[in-house]
Each structure stands twice: as C-alpha cells, then as structure tokens.
Amino acid sequence: MAKQGKDTPDIYDNISSNNINNGSYSEDNKIRMNLSRKLVRVHQNSQTGNPDFLLIGIPGCTNVSYVKVYYIKDGKLNQAKFLDPNNNDSNEVLTSNSRSLFFNQTEDNIFETSLYDNAETFMFYIHSWKFNLDSGNFTYLSSRSMSVDDYYNYGDKIN
C-alpha cells in the first residue's frame, strides 16, 4: 500500500499481478476504493488451525462488489481462487451488500457470498463455497434463493 495525501491510500494488488518481487506499482494493479462502504475487512476463521481471510472489495455497481480474498500460508500471503460449477477459476467473486461485504462462514471451510437478481426474480441468491487450504481454492457447492426481507434479516443476524 502506498499512501498518497492525507486520507486517500493507494492500494496495489502485486500478488495476482506477479509484481510482488519487483515492487512495480502501476495503474493496472491499482485497487479502486469506495471509502463510503466497508470494503476492506478481515474475516476471522472460526476453524482452528486455518487462516483468517483479508477481504478487499472493489465496487462493481450500486449493490455489488468484486471481492478478492487473501490468506497466509507458510508465512506467505496468497490470493484465493474461486472455482465455478464448470471448474472455471477466477481471482475474485461477486457479492452483494450495500453496507459491507457479504462473506459468511457457516461451518468449517464452508463460506457464503450473495448476489441480487434485479432483472427477473428480484431475489437474493446465497452461494456456498468450500475452501481448500492446500489448493487455495473456493469450490462452488450450491445456491439458494431468499426474498429481499429474508436476506436483510439473515444479513443482520450474521454481521
């Protein structure tokens, strides 16, 4: 992280861009922050012996953020990948919540993210993922839907 001015830090992702060894800071790996939302936080893992996660959200639109998830293994900071049902991988996952990042741990190595369908069903979809520390991957497990009211009640209980 490089501090520019009093209140505006510039944050660069040098892990996924492979620039960590040369110290290169470019606009290509700069993370844009929205300081009015809680888009950077540490998720404390409830499972003993597994790492906590650093979550960095990048605004995608009004109610969606792209979330990059980082963890420490063997003393090294790593970026997790997300595997969809077709085993396509991504360095980030979409999640919905206008107040903060929706990232919930339901049991050992099982986590949730959410998305809102504002075009057809007008429902929230909670996606479940299983984390594997050896591979650093979150593998998609399932999805379930919730009404808007149920989603916000659920979110209030977990945050």
Image: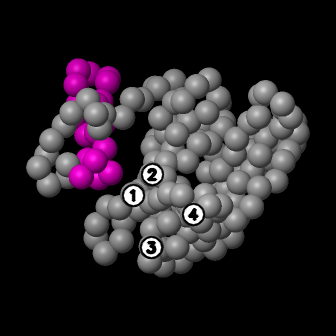
Q: Find numbered disc 4 in the image and state the secondary structure of the residue it sits on.
A: loop
Label 1 neighbour load within 10 Å: few <14, some 14-19, many 20+: some
Q: Which residue is mark 4?
A: 87
Rendered residue at 45%/51% (across/down): 91
Verify CB contact (< 8 Å) between mark 3 and mark 1.
no
Q: From the image, which quarter does the N terminus lie in?
A: top left
**Distance (Cα) linking label 1 and label 2:** 7 Å
Verify CB contact (< 8 Å) between mark 1 and mark 2.
yes
State yes or no: residue 9 in magenta: yes
**Distance (Cα) linking label 1 and label 4:** 17 Å
Q: Earlier in the sequence, mark 1 or mark 4?
A: 1
**Distance (Cα) linking label 2 and label 4:** 13 Å
Q: Earlier in the sequence, mark 3 or mark 1?
A: 1
Q: Which residue is mark 1?
A: 79
On the question of residue 46 being in view, the answer is no
Disc on res. 91? 2
State yes or no: residue 12 in magenta: yes
For marks 2 and 4, give the one nearer the viewer: 4
Q: Which residue is mark 3?
A: 135
Q: Earlier in the sequence, mark 3 or mark 2?
A: 2
Q: Earlier in the sequence, mark 3 or mark 4?
A: 4
Verify CB contact (< 8 Å) between mark 2 and mark 4.
no
Rendered residue at 22%/25% (across/down): 4
